[in-house]
Image: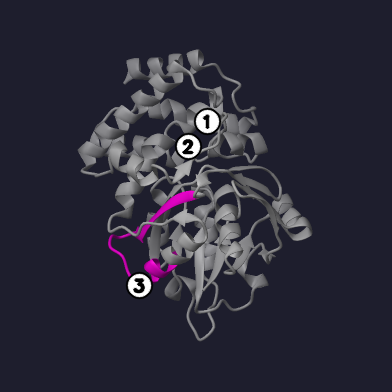
Amino acid sequence: MRYIVIGAGAIGATIGGRLADTGREVVLVARGAHAEALRADGLRLTTAAGTRVHRLPVVTGPAELGELRPDDVLLLAVKTQDAVAALDTWGDAEVAGGGTAAQRLPLLCAQNGVESERLALRRFARVYGVCVWLPASFLEPGVVEALCAPLTGVLHLGKAAGGTDRRVREIAIDLEKAGFAAPVVEDVMRWKHAKLLGNLGNAIQATTGPEPDPAKAALLLRAIREAEAAYAAAGIAHTSQEEQARAREGRVVPPAGVRGGSSWQSLARGTGSVEADYLNGEISLLGRLHAVPTPVNDTLRHAANIFAREGLPPGAMSIGDLTALADEAAARS
């Protein structure tokens, strides 16, 4: 199999680089200064085992590859706000022997949130969810760090619509050889809905900084409580904290120190957008569909988007001010 990593950022580049370590064919898809750096200097990937420079094929789109191969696996790792453009571009790519990528090739959604699988299933016949537990940093073009040990991360895999098959089990074997735990599960979206609860704090980190604070923890708990109420109203199941802890225990230990998450990193790189519409916004959507108030998540989504749109530096807001905005929204709801 050849792995085409669509979105070679923190997650995509780490998975791609680690697969390349084991001899698997990998193509990185990137754009702008990051693509230029990858082509000129290679991917500088630092893991717990040290730093290695990977000189891998880099493209900005499918036209640069020509016809795709029947054994290609597409790994979608762009942020969800960029997923539709990527899915449309790659879905229409022709595959040798006939048909398109959307008709013939497996697509793995290795992203936060739960919307990308739904977007992909509208276009692709073979869609798999990946619940990603892989703390990594991408702050400058061509350079990625993923320092967990003894394994680089935990990637739960399964068919997005439920169940498993031979292809996803083969992919899991490749990932395990590359330094990941890769459990194949019947209910991958149950794992992804659980991961989403923790990702509701991404907006808090982005706007007030990643440093621990009891007031930040309290605001995150309020956001999670709203989400759990929305899940209950919608009949959505999710794995427990205990199940998640057992899956990671002794396998992935993050490095010491405070590190900003994906939304914080997006602001630090000045990308102009964050995932808040598909993290906190997912809870707002469920709340509106099922008559569950979600003022905290509404506030976090709005604040993070303002930071991204106006180019504000991450951490420029106090947790007191953010909490006050959430309180005002709760009073109005």
Q: Taking 296 as reference, is 233 above or below it?
A: below
Q: x%, y% of residue 328?
A: 40, 15
Q: Which range of residues does the magenta coloring cover?
A: 153-171
Image quadrant where residue 280 sits = top left
- Residue beneath the point at 36% across and 57% down: 183
In the figure, 196 relative to 12: above or below?
Answer: above
Residue 166: assigned label: 3
Placement of 319 over or under 265, stated as above or below: above
Give the quadrant of residue 182.
Answer: bottom left
Query: Do the numbered discs 1 and 2 sit on residues whose CB atoms are within 8 Å?
Result: yes
Q: Which residue is denoted by mark 2 in the rendering?
A: 276
Q: Amino acid at mark 2?
A: Ala
Residue 271 x, y percent position in the rendering: 64, 41
Name the residue carrying label 1: 304
Packing grade of label 3 (10 A; few <14, some 14-19, many >=20) is: few
Q: Residues within 10 Å of mark 2 (few under 14, many from 20)?
A: many
